[in-house]
Amino acid sequence: MVRELAARAKQAAERMAAAGGREKKRALLAAAELLEAEKDALFEANAEDLKAAREAGITGAKYDRLRLDEKTLRTLQAGLRQLAEMPEVVGEISEMRTLENGLKVGRMRVPLGLVGFVYESRPGATVEAAGIVVKAGNAILLRGGSEAIRSNTALVALLRRALGEAGLPEDAITLVPTPDREAVLEMLRLSEYIDVLIPRGGDALIRLVTENARMPVLYHAKGVNHLFVDEEADLEMALKLAVNGKVQRPGVCNALETLLVHEKVAGAFLPELAKAMFAHGVELRGDERSRAIVPEMKPATEEDWAAEYLDLILAVRVVPDLDAALAHIAQYGSHHTEVIATENYAKALRFLREVDASLVLVNASPRLNDGFQLGLGAEIGISTTKLHAYGPMGVRELTTSKWVGLGSGQLRE
């Protein structure tokens, strides 16, 4: 079954590569309208998934990511409309230059082809991924988790309808309609159809895909994200960054997991941090120096420094200087999102240069590492690999470039 679906999706990808910007825009706008028109049916399907999830004992971050509500739909609609209005990148020619023999050469941006997307929970990811793929002139073969099968089925039916209304092949958005794990393994073997595979989920899923895929894989690992509060930070602003990063939505990959505080401001900053975090129900786990200032913190263990909690838990460490903060991030970070709070320009630039992460920020919340927040319309994931994308993968990251040449009879001598 999966092979047949992939073959049809691959044929659709060939048609999508030649699709015009007008048709793609029409499909994206139609999808945004259908999300509103069909929201009652979507909420009904999602309610069934949520009920099954509760009965299966799914709680916390995974349950939260499964929910579809009015706010989520509005965000998805805004993302689709933003994608629709973005400039067309497919066919864009850059770096054109004329060689000594008169041949003009450059690079043309082209679609990747058929994208395989294996993911867990979030039905909203179905819409985001499909929208980006359509805008980039690709097709997508989706295999979501069993916990969201009803929501994903309803969403994909809606998205395929939008493609048809725009005169585009409906098979450009295809869902593998079974939660069977064997379906994933079969997808991973279909390198003759699937050009790139993108997994989005927990460590077990990432390992399954990276160890078995026969095609290139773009994946994102866990988000062990840090905020370093420098001695020259605006402490009031730093507190707001910490609270937003940890509290706003703790069960996502761009949430704050570890706070590093310069020893010269720890005495002033940590009591205020504790007051704010405890008010939001956050558990703090600190090193000895942090607990000497805020005894209510629980002792941090070695495992805490590498933990992605996805919960209202925050690890806290006092460090002597920027060098120590950089060393801690290099040892425990996951190349996802790293932040410095400082008013020192030189330190800010050094942090930007030396920290190895998909997004490095100065005086901004880690929660901003998101395709929609960064103006990409949406994202299919946040790549912590470096080939061929690093960070949120939007439309441009779902294309590649080929060399093109314009000649007038040039020969090789």
Image: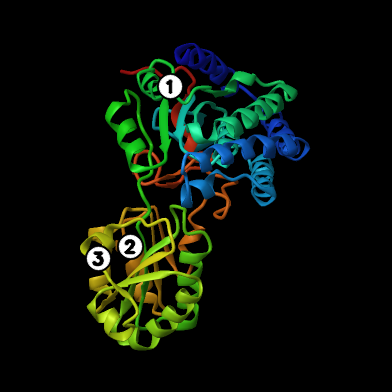
Q: Which residue is mark 3?
A: 328
356 or 129: which is nearer to us?
129
Q: Position of residue 188 (x, y in %)?
A: 36, 23
What distance separates the C-alpha of mark 3 from that of mark 2? Answer: 16 Å
**Circles 2 and 1: CB atoms closer than 8 Å:** no
- Disc 3 or 2, which lies upstream in sequence? 3
65 or 387: which is nearer to us?
65
Q: Reply above or below: 407 against 375.
A: above
**What residue is rendered at 35% in x and 57% in y?**
224
Q: Between tags 3 and 2, which lies in front? A: 3
Q: Reply above or below: 373 against 405.
A: below
Crowd rating for badge 2 (residues with CA inside 10 Å; few <14, some 14–19, many 20+): few
**What residue is rendered at 58% in x and 22% in y?**
172
Dot 1 lies on which element? loop
Q: Position of residue 139 (x, y in %)?
A: 54, 25
**Circles 1 and 3: CB atoms closer than 8 Å:** no
Give the position of the C terminus as an image quadrant: top left
Dot 3 lies on which element? helix
What distance separates the C-alpha of mark 2 from that of mark 1? Answer: 36 Å
The amino acid on which the numbered mark 2 sits, given as a three-letter code, is: Arg
Q: Position of residue 52 (x, y in %)?
A: 54, 37
The amino acid on which the numbered mark 3 sits, given as a three-letter code, is: His
**What residue is rendered at 49% in x and 11% in y?**
4
Q: Which residue is mark 2?
A: 353
Q: Which residue is mark 1?
A: 194
**Viewer can see residue 63:** yes
Position of 81 compared to 311: left or right? right
- Disc 1 or 3, which lies upstream in sequence? 1
